[in-house]
Image: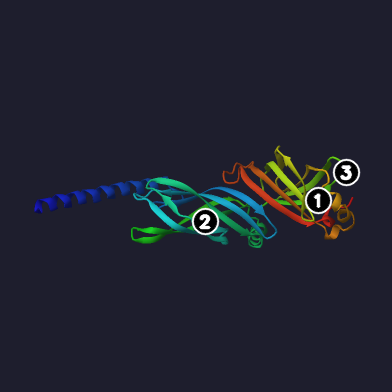
Amino acid sequence: MKKGWIIALTLLLIGIVGAFIWYSRLKSNAAAEGGPYDNTLKPRLEMSTIDIHNIDDDYIDMDVRMLIDNPLPVGFKASRLNYTVLMANTPIVEDKYEKAIEVKSGDSTYVTLPMRVMIKKLSTVLETLDKKGIDSTTYTVRSTFDLDVPILGNRTFSQTFEKRLPTFYIPKIKVEDIDFGKLGLKRTDVAAKVNIVNKNKFDFSFTDTRYTVSINGKEIAEGYQPEPIVIKKQATTPVVYPITIKPGQTLELLPKMLFDKKDTPFLVTMTSKLIDKSGSVMLNNSKFNTTIRGTLADFKKD
């Protein structure tokens, strides 16, 4: 019996020593890689891509795809992920992801974090950077995982991801005019004249663009521009999007369109893909959706 305990204790010690050697090698490899994680052997968080779903008057809705890498000798499962996003050390998003996250030992997975950025808060940060002439800044994601089962006695673990990137200004889109051309019996050719303001120090393109036009709450037209349109850096690029209205869609709106422009609202929605000419992995091929509101009185007078 005593001999059996000695053998069991010896095997346990061998296992502990082996685990320590394995852990030390992983930690040394992490240190050799350098980067923001130094020699900390714990789950890592990295930003992958950004999809902008909608730009409204007060907020921007986007999804940020994050890579979670687990170099630990054990897997983990988290019931919630709390996260804060900072731009130039200023919080612009605080939210939580409440779906279960499970990552096996030595494996990785992606999670998509929904984020709503308030325009006022973002504009304050951008204006400060602009006044100081700063064209690049540090983007930070601070995260805390709530674990189902403790790891090394801890119910939570935190991770911070930082990356210095060019300051990104959200493109501003203004509808200058909607030219209805000649009203026909079968169809109406419409041109939406748009100005796209790009304050960034790099060109990008909008491609695969789809759009709709609504007047006084009624969707009257839609269109599609498959070809890429280059938006010049630090400039305003005028674009004309062709639209076709189906017959009968504008007849009942004509009196308001002609004589009550001030009180006749319009709504233009645009969905496109952003091609980043600077080669940014995070922004290139991102979805870009925006909504433009106003009244017909806002349009340019010829």
Most foreground residue, 221 or 149: 221
Of labels 3 and 1, earlier in sequence is: 1
The answer to whether residue 40 is visible is: no
Question: Which label lies toward us, 3 or 1?
Answer: 3
Labels 1 and 2 touching (C-beta < 8 A): no
Kindly identify the residue that appears in the image at 65 percent across and 56 percent down: 133
Question: Which label lies toward us, 1 or 2?
Answer: 1
Of labels 3 and 2, earlier in sequence is: 2
Most foreground residue, 262 or 41: 262
Helix, strand or loop at mark 2? strand
Mark 2 sits on what residue? 141
Mark 1 sits on what residue? 176
Q: Amino acid at mark 2?
A: Val
Q: Amino acid at mark 3?
A: Leu
Q: Is residue 228 left or right of residue 38?
A: right
Coloration mode: rainbow
Does 76 appear above or below 279?
Answer: below
Residue at mark 3 to residue at mark 2: CA–CA distance: 53 Å
Estimate how packed mark 2 is, as few (under 14), some (14 to 19) or many (20 or more) residues with alpha carbons within 10 Å: many
Helix, strand or loop at mark 3? loop
Residue at mark 3 to residue at mark 1: CA–CA distance: 20 Å
Mark 3 sits on what residue? 183
Picture coordinates of residue 281, whole percent (x, y): 57, 43
Estimate how packed mark 3 is, as few (under 14), some (14 to 19) or many (20 or more) residues with alpha carbons within 10 Å: some
Q: Quadrant of residue 241?
A: top right
